């Protein structure tokens, strides 16, 4: 997933600068594997990046994190991984 795709898919993060988004996209890429996820890679990459952004200080200030520390993006990421890789546990 590139910067333009991320901004289209997750417009709520458009106020973050392109440099910040690029850094978080790079971090998100470390959590996903294209050869394992196949055609779900971009979706997983975007969700993981959004989760990382939401849990960042800026995301916390925007109240994107639930009291239990979860985010909508993190939960969706875990569900995607579970559906794609049955039996695989995501922490």
Image (tube, rainbow, N blue to C red):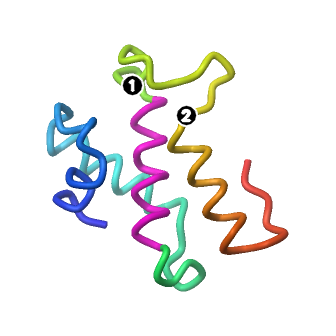
Q: Which residue corresponds to mark 1?
A: 59
Depth-wise, is mark 1 or mark 2 nearer the camera? 2
53 w.r.t. 67: above or below: below
In this view, 22 is above or below 56: below
The x and y percentages for residue 13 are: 26, 37
The kind of secondary structure element at disc 1 is helix
Q: Nearer the viewer, residue 68 or 56?
A: 68
Q: Secondary structure at mark 2?
A: loop
Q: Is residue 21 above or below residue 2?
A: above
Q: Quadrant of residue 77?
A: bottom right
Q: State the residue in front, 35 or 86.
A: 86
Q: Position of residue 44 (x, y in %)?
A: 49, 63
- Residue 15 inside the magenta-drawn segment: no
Q: CA distance from mark 1 to mark 2?
A: 10 Å
**Majority secondary structure of magenta residues:** helix
In front of the other: 50 or 25: 50
Question: Which residue is labeled 2 in the image?
Answer: 71
Quarter where residue 63 is shown: top left
Around disc 2, counting alpha carbons within 10 Å, would you say few (fewer than 14), some (14 to 19), or many (20 or more)? Answer: many
- Residue range corresponding to the magenta coloring: 41-55
**Mark nearer the N terminus (1 vs 2):** 1
The residue depicted at 17 percent of the width and 44 percent of the height is: 19
Residue 33 placement (x, y as % from top left): 54, 74
Q: Are marks 1 and 2 in contact (CB under 8 Å)?
A: yes
């Amino acid at each position: 997933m590139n910067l333009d795709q991320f901004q289209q898919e997750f417009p709520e993060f458009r106020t973050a600068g392109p440099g910040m988004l690029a850094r978080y996209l790079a971090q998100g890429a470390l959590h996903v594997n294209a050869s394992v996820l196949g055609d779900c890679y971009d979706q997983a990459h975007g969700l993981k990046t959004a989760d990382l952004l939401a849990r960042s200080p800026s995301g916390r200030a925007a109240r994107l994190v639930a009291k239990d520390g979860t985010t909508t993006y993190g939960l969706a990421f875990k569900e995607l991984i579970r559906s794609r890789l049955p039996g695989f546990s995501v922490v």
